Image (cartoon, helix red, strand yellow):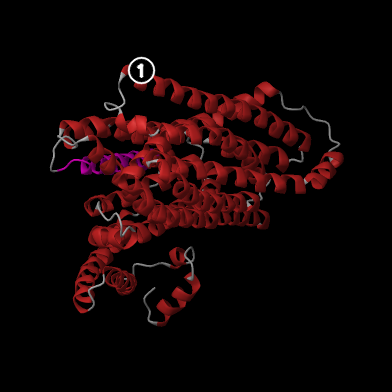
Amino acid sequence: MDAKKSSNASFVKMAAILAVAGILTRIIGFLYRLPLTNMIGDEGNGIYAAGYNVYNFFLIMSSAGLPTAISRMIAEKAAIGQYRNVKKIFNYSMLVSAGISLFLALIMAGGTFAFQRFCEIGGHTQRLYLWYSSIYCLYSLAPTVFIVGVMSVYRGYFQGLQTTVPTSVSQIIEQIFNAVFSVFLAWLWMKYGIEYGAAGGTAGTGVGAAAGLGVIFIYYLAGSKQRKRLLKEDTKEYDLERGKDISINLIKISVPMIIGTAIFSMTNFVDMAMVESRLAAAGFDHDTVVKLYGQLNGKYVTITTMPVSISTAIAIAVIPSIAASVVRKEFNEVKSKLDTALRVTMILSIPAAFGLGVLGTPILKMLFPRHAEGGSLITAGGLSIIFLALSLILTGVLQGIGNLKAPALNSLWSALIKIPINYVLIAIPQINIIGAIISTTACYFMCSVLNLISLKKETGVSPDYAGILVKPTIASVIMAVFCFLSYKLFYMILPSNTIATLFAIVVAVLVYFIAMALIKGFRRADLNMLPMGKKLIRILEKYNRI
């Protein structure tokens, strides 16, 4: 029993370290987009996003799911002391991943060149303006596909050995270099034109990836003596893994995850492909189309994914423990842990959705003073935060208990509903780009529902919907009213948008916490997963609010 508890604690600790790294990288990623957006504007953001979405698809095909697949295979062999097999799995995975990543990087670069020639020779540069404007971004991003593919093998290797520090440190260093060089290169290349400025922003991604690879490779070299010792001590007789078996296992584990992730990435392609043509049908010119697309990706996506990444990073730490309880058929524990993960996610996501709905425009004015357009997108898209967070957590839980097929299929069916909604709504001039946000919200809502159905079929467990959704929603409604009124009041007293917005956010946080305490919306297990959780528990216990 002690060994079991120790194992569970180890898994949760690993996940928690990755969660902290994930939160830090998201914060850094959010912060550097502020000066970048103020520098290249909405048009530059549109070009940047068009190139980055294509790159992201190639990146998913080359490396999504690989760290998980490799870590599982290595963990299984390391657990029984088969370190010769660990070495063989690592070497073979590196060969396969490097080969696939190099091939895809060349395809991306070659495809970009072919597309460029097609547009220039065929006279399609204006008809495909958004796509054509992103070619320099694509050229700068192509080598990054190979770099990240190689890095994913090292990350999977260390996670398989149950040490998440190398991965976490490399992620943070990668994002720091990415932030610094993206802003610097965008500033340096802006004098050549907006397309080059956007390409400078994407070039920083490659510099960051190279730095992250360098850091994790140093960790790998530092462990060479320990690897040699373990290999020397591994004197047992057993069959070495065949290359064929390794490749089959890699495919079996990673492909469903790649498909599921790629489908969500394809939703960006759906938007990218349809936004240009449907906005044109609504009567918008090329420059306006690119600016609106830049607002969608550079502002709406950047701002709304920030609270989601924090809430899911905290809650996802409990997923390995849920998986362990499913294996032991402890379904009461499964329900308890699932409720905790979902409650923590909703406790953070629901108020974020309401807060952005109320303060969408003031927040944009504060963050992007030179390019503050697009507040209506944030207001309209606040609701998507709730369903995106819910779908991500449930996808993680399903994958954690070994059901890789259901999340992929659920993502596919959900992505398909974007097409008719985009087609109809984006072409309505009064709705325009907000149609893409409505379709995204519908997509995440459907994915959440389908994932809940799959989870019920897999485990027989249904979450406590009332406890998860009702109390955070009540507290968020109260918070939104105070948030709106406090912004108006502070702005009347001191007509500064930044000061009024910051004060309104502080009021919102305090009111939400007090409202949740008054209706006893917090539980000890929830607060234990949050920063300063123990201190919050003591405060609530003092007033009998928990």
Residue in the picture at 59% in, 57% down: 13
Q: In terms of image quadrants, where is residue 125?
A: top left
Residue 202 forms part of the magenta stretch = no
Look at the picture and state if 249 lies above or below 340: above
- Among all residues in the image, which is located at the extreme front? 191
Q: Is residue 326 visible?
A: yes
Residue 31 image offset from top left, x and y in percent: 43, 57
Write down the quadrant of residue 63 in the picture.
top right
Q: Which residue is mark 1?
A: 121
Residue 421 visible? The answer is no
Name the quadrant containing residue 102: top right
Farthest residue in the top direction?
122
Front residue of 415/292: it is: 292
Residue count near mark 1 (Cα–Cα under 10 Å), binned few <14, some 14–19, many ≥20: few
Where disc 1 sits, the SS reads helix
Residue stretch rendered in magenta on the structure: 431-454
The image shows residue 429 at horizontal and vertical percentages of 13, 39
The amino acid marked with disc number 1 is Ile
Residue drawn at 59 percent across, 37 percent down:
147
Please give left or right for residue 260 compared with residue 147 in the image.
Answer: left
Residue projecting furthest to the bottom = 542
User: How far across and down, in percent of the image, does residue 436 sit?
Assistant: 25, 40
Is 440 magenta? The answer is: yes
Q: Quarter holding the N terminus?
A: bottom right
Q: Position of residue 529 (x, y in %)?
A: 48, 63
Is residue 455 placed above or below 502 in the rendered structure? above
Q: Is residue 254 left or right of residue 132?
A: right
Q: The C terminus appears in which quarter of the rendering?
A: bottom left
Camera-side residue of 312 and 238: 312
User: Which of 309 and 445 lies nearest the eye of the viewer?
Assistant: 309
In this figure, what is the number of numbered marks? Answer: 1
The front one of 339 and 24 is 24
